[in-house]
Image (cartoon, coloured by chain):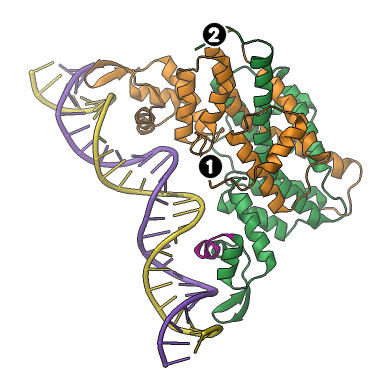
Chain colours: A orange, B green, C yellow, D purple
DNA sequence: CAATAGTGGATACCTTCACTTTCCAATATG
DNA sequence: CATATTGGAAAGTGAAGGTATCCACTATTG
């Protein structure tokens, strides 16, 4: 198919497809002449994936490029699979640069230690956890019931369920599953959490008793 | 204190403080004359909170304004607390407008039904779950081990732990806790998940055996 | 086989967002 | 009184993510 049909099929404007081609998110079509190329089903799928990464997963075009790059050109070893997934999707800079100094990683480190987890001590995620904890602090809110450690243990269950789906026989499939799982399940997690909150709140405030009013 | 000291204390540029004042995120200082106002400790705290919302929580200035608006001017009833929290932080539009038609809410509805949750059938979160599920589909990845329902059940535990911290005696404190909890715990959740993945991946690929290759 | 429409590619432009800069007239302050 | 600050308005900025415009070329189609 030519670009206009690709556009119709994928519901992405031609100009935008060209943009993604320029940015290297979408591989070029197969050239049939100096000014013509044909695109395949694979291009349609790829565009869908790109839109999923840029939309729900909220990745920047640059981050999406890194994610797709890891999928297209996977690391050699299983050990590197997750690391690749995570550094590819880190918000800014990616390669281990400090955002602005490092104000205080200790609370984050302590929490991880309390949970008994083994993590990369220099990973971006640790920095992000630290700043997330500072934000909670700034909000002056009470931490989760049972403490953050309980929260962490529950999240660990999630991580186990996710990683159980990663095939251990072939690196390229493992990469795809873990890289895309890492980013595409985030919005699922977030929206499920909010829906669960609705359910819990409903039980708390409606069923048992309603504090004191109508409306 | 005057604006320049507020700036020093909060580490936010004067021009930015003025911007937040203009956008209504920060309440004006107390006027002492036509061209002078004094700011309090409360302003310092508020600025910290604003930065937490705009930074780690990744809210837009507009969404942050809605969140702060709910806190400053809480709903009357407990029933509305969570709803207010959630609509205030919804990505776009907020008030129940369809992003672009509604392609297919059914998978989301089904999942929620399977979990036995009671949720607002018209809530934005349902739409977001639907589009998140479509994104997973687009990525062609296997769903979590044990199915999404298992994932959902685990998330429900999280929601319970969170909502257990919401005081049930005073609406204004309940609002603050649930509104800020909703948004400020998201980055905590996300970064903890990734750290948990590191731990799980480490156990899978390092301890037991490494599959079969070098590099 | 000429007229028309559709291409790939490059470049310029546009819009939104979150700030920054610049001005200003009116105080504060030394 | 001279200089520095202030609150406030308005214009400007830089990054991000597209769009729009051109253009020299095919690829049809009548």
Please give left or right for residue B76 compared with residue B101 in the image. right
Q: Is residue A20 magenta?
A: no
Using the rendered image of the protein, determine whether residue B122 is visible from the camera's viewpoint: no
> Under tag 2, what secondary structure?
loop
Q: CA distance from mark 2 to mark 1?
A: 33 Å
Q: Which residue in the structure is indicated by mark 2? A: B213
Q: Which residue in the structure is indicated by mark 1? A: A98
| Residue B29 sits above or below residue B56 on the image | below
> Do the numbered discs 2 and 1 sit on residues whose CB atoms are within 8 Å?
no
Stretch of the chain drawn in magenta = B11-19
In which quarter of the view is residue A183 placed?
top right
User: How many numbered discs?
Assistant: 2
Disc marking residue A1 = none
Image coords of residue B135 (percent x, y):
57, 26
| Residue C9 sits above or below residue A201 on the image | above
In which quarter of the view is residue B183 placed?
top right
Discs 2 and 1 carry the same chain letter: no
Residue A25 versus residue A171: which sits nearer the camera? A171
Q: Residues within 10 Å of mark 1 (few under 14, many from 20)?
A: few
The residue located at (64%, 15%) in the rendering is: B205
The chain letter under disc 2 is: B
Using the rendered image of the protein, determine whether residue A20 is visible from the camera's viewpoint: yes
């Amino acid at each position: 198919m030519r670009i206009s049909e690709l556009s119709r099929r994928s519901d992405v404007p031609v100009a935008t497809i060209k943009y993604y081609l320029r940015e290297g998110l979408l591989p070029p079509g197969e050239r049939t002449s100096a000014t013509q190329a044909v695109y395949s089903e694979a291009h349609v799928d790829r565009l869908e994936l790109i839109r999923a990464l840029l939309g729900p997963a909220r990745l920047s075009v640059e981050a999406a490029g890194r994610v797709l790059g890891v999928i297209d050109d996977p690391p050699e070893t299983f050990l590197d699979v997750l690391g690749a997934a995570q550094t590819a999707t880190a918000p800014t800079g990616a390669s281990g640069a400090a955002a602005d100094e490092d104000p205080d990683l200790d609370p984050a480190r302590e929490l991880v230690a309390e949970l008994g987890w083994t993590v990369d001590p220099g990973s971006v995620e640790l920095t992000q956890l630290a700043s997330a904890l500072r934000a909670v602090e700034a909000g002056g809110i009470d931490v989760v019931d049972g403490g953050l450690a309980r929260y962490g243990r529950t999240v660990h269950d999630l991580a186990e369920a996710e990683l159980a789906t990663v095939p251990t026989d072939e690196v390229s499939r493992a990469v795809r599953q873990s890289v895309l799982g890492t980013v595409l399940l985030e919005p699922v997690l977030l929206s499920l959490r909010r829906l669960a909150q609705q359910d819990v709140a409903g039980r708390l405030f409606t069923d048992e008793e309603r504090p004191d009013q109508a409306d």
